[in-house]
Image (cartoon, rainbow, N blue to C red):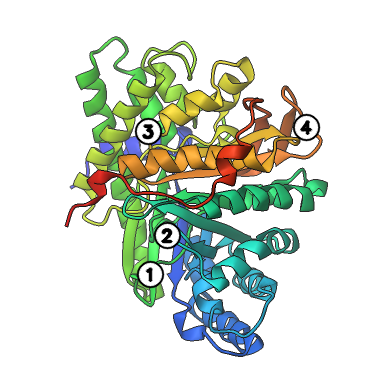
């Protein structure tokens, strides 16, 4: 039985330490919606999404009110659209994106993910059509998020897809320049993408998933930061134990909400993603956790080691709290969405090169990074290739969500508001990678991928 002290502690975590359920995400399979007639396929997609998710927002709000636990977002993830649209005899896939957007608006969710393609070993014609349509799709929709998986540990890196995504990101930025290139905030390029990720913009419903499923993403950087304040000066094994215990409590709350949502929506419970997902709010920062461990500024020497400890301890605490931990589960380091990361980047201590090193030991990758608008497509592609190599060799998920902001230069700032925060425009290396990207082909999988 919970003690009064434990109840009051949890209330304090919610009230003052920014603990929340970041998202309840319903995954929906659209494989049954394929049709040779694209218009009929879109009709099936709209009907299925709105039927499956019609009560998602209401149930989330009911749980939030009854349990007193903030649930920030209600979202939908669908089967990668390139797989669904492949049966349709059409050249333009933008109507599929418009259908997703309309269904999301009808359901009242914050975002819908799955305008996606999986091209880590090669591209089908449907994959090419979808990828080429991404700039227009993200320009003409409000709630649709897109992702492309360009590499994996088993397949290597599809460098033709990497080069194409460099051009797609640049075009997306240009098409949405009236919104400071914010279309790129809804576009992620993955290596080793997972099929049960509830977080946007990279969520999609994998082909190995059930017809529909409920996945929950929790968050709690502020809770971890507060816990570490009480053990200043203690050795690292004490730090690790403290993080583990805190992650356990956070994950138990996510498990409770996930099971309740699953029951009320008559939908199987999938996973709890226990990632520490920061916000621009003061006191809700992963960077400040690392600084609490003894770093003057996030990005200085020692940052990668501190992040490795944090990520490992979060996972260990989480897996003891739930038998269904999945998604990405660790620490996110999105620059624009983390108050401490923003400050460190503005000071010049946190650089893209240091962030790349940090991604070797954390959950995702180079996330929500603004770069000058005149950054070439080849440089963007080379950044993607570097990050994909980190994921491929280390057998982990990595990603790039980068914003080449039209008209902005190093030292400028991009104000996005809400959870997206503000992004200082960070420098990239001026030396060209064009000849490297022009080679194309596939970087082979590493030797340790041969595990059969």
Q: Which residue is mark 3?
A: 360
The residue positioned 70% from the left and 60% from the top of the image is 142
Q: Are marks 1 and 3 in contact (CB under 8 Å)?
A: no
Q: Secondary structure at mark 4?
A: loop
Q: Which residue is mark 1?
A: 213
Residue 421 image position (x, y, % from top left): 64, 37
Q: CA distance from mark 1 to mark 3?
A: 30 Å
**Location of the C terminus (image quadrant):** bottom left
Q: Are marks 2 and 1 in contact (CB under 8 Å)?
A: no
Q: Is residue 58 above or below residue 199?
A: below
- What numbered label is drawn on residue 121? 2
Q: Are marks 2 and 3 in contact (CB under 8 Å)?
A: no
In this rendering, would 292 be left or right of 164? left
Residue 255 image position (x, y, % from top left): 30, 55
Residue 56 image position (x, y, % from top left): 50, 69
- What numbered label is drawn on residue 408? 4
Q: Nearer the viewer, mark 1 or mark 4?
A: 4
In this rendering, would 184 be left or right of 366? right
The residue positioned 29% from the left and 9% from the top of the image is 233
Q: Is residue 368 above or below residue 128?
A: above
- In primary-sequence order, the first of circles 4 and 2 is 2
Q: Please rate how many residues cluster around mark 4, counting C-alpha atoms within 10 Å: few if below 14, some from 14 to 19, many from 20.
A: some
């Amino acid at each position: 039985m919970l003690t009064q002290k434990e109840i009051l502690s949890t209330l304090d975590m919610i009230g003052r330490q920014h603990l929340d359920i970041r998202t309840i995400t319903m995954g929906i399979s659209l494989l049954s919606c394929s049709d040779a007639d694209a218009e009929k396929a879109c009709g099936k997609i709209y009907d299925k999404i709105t039927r499956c998710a019609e009560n998602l927002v209401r149930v989330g709000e009911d749980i939030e009110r009854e349990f007193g636990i903030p649930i920030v977002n209600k979202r939908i993830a669908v089967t990668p659209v390139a797989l669904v649209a492949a049966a349709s005899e059409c050249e333009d896939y933008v109507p599929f994106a418009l259908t997703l957007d309309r269904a999301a608006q009808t359901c009242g969710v914050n975002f819908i993910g799955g305008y996606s393609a999986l091209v880590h070993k090669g591209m089908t014609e449907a994959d090419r059509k979808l990828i080429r349509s991404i700039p227009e799709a993200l320009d003409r929709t409000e709630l649709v998020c897109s992702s492309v998986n360009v590499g994996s540990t088993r397949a290597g890196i599809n460098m033709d897809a990497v080069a194409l995504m460099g051009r797609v990101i640049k075009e997306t930025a240009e098409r949405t320049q009236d919104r400071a290139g914010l279309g790129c905030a809804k576009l992620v390029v993955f290596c080793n993408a997972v099929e049960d990720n509830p977080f946007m913009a990279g969520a999609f419903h994998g082909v190995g998933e059930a017809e529909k499923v409920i996945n929950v993403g929790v968050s709690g950087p502020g809770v971890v930061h507060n816990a570490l304040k009480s053990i200043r000066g203690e050795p690292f094994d004490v730090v690790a134990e403290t993080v583990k215990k805190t992650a356990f409590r956070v994950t138990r709350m996510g498990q409770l909400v996930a099971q309740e949502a699953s029951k009320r929506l008559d939908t199987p419970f999938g996973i709890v993603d226990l990632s520490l997902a920061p916000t621009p709010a003061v006191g809700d920062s992963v960077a400040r956790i690392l600084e609490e461990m003894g770093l003057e500024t996030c990005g200085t020497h020692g940052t990668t080691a501190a992040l490795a400890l944090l990520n490992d301890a979060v996972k260990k605490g989480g897996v003891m709290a739930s038998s269904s931990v999945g998604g990405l589960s660790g620490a996110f380091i999105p620059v624009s969405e983390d108050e401490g990361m923003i400050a460190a980047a503005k000071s010049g201590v946190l650089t893209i090169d240091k962030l790349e090193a940090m991604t070797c030991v954390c959950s995702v990758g180079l996330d929500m990074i603004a770069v000058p608008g005149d950054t070439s497509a080849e440089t963007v592609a080379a950044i993607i290739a570097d990050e994909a190599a980190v994921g491929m060799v280390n057998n982990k998920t990595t990603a790039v969500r980068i914003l080449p902001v039209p008209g902005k230069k190093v030292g400028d700032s991009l104000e996005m508001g809400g959870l997206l925060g503000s992004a200082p425009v960070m420098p990239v290396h001026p030396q060209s990678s064009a000849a490297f990207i022009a080679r194309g082909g596939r970087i082979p999988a590493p030797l340790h991928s041969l595990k059969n």
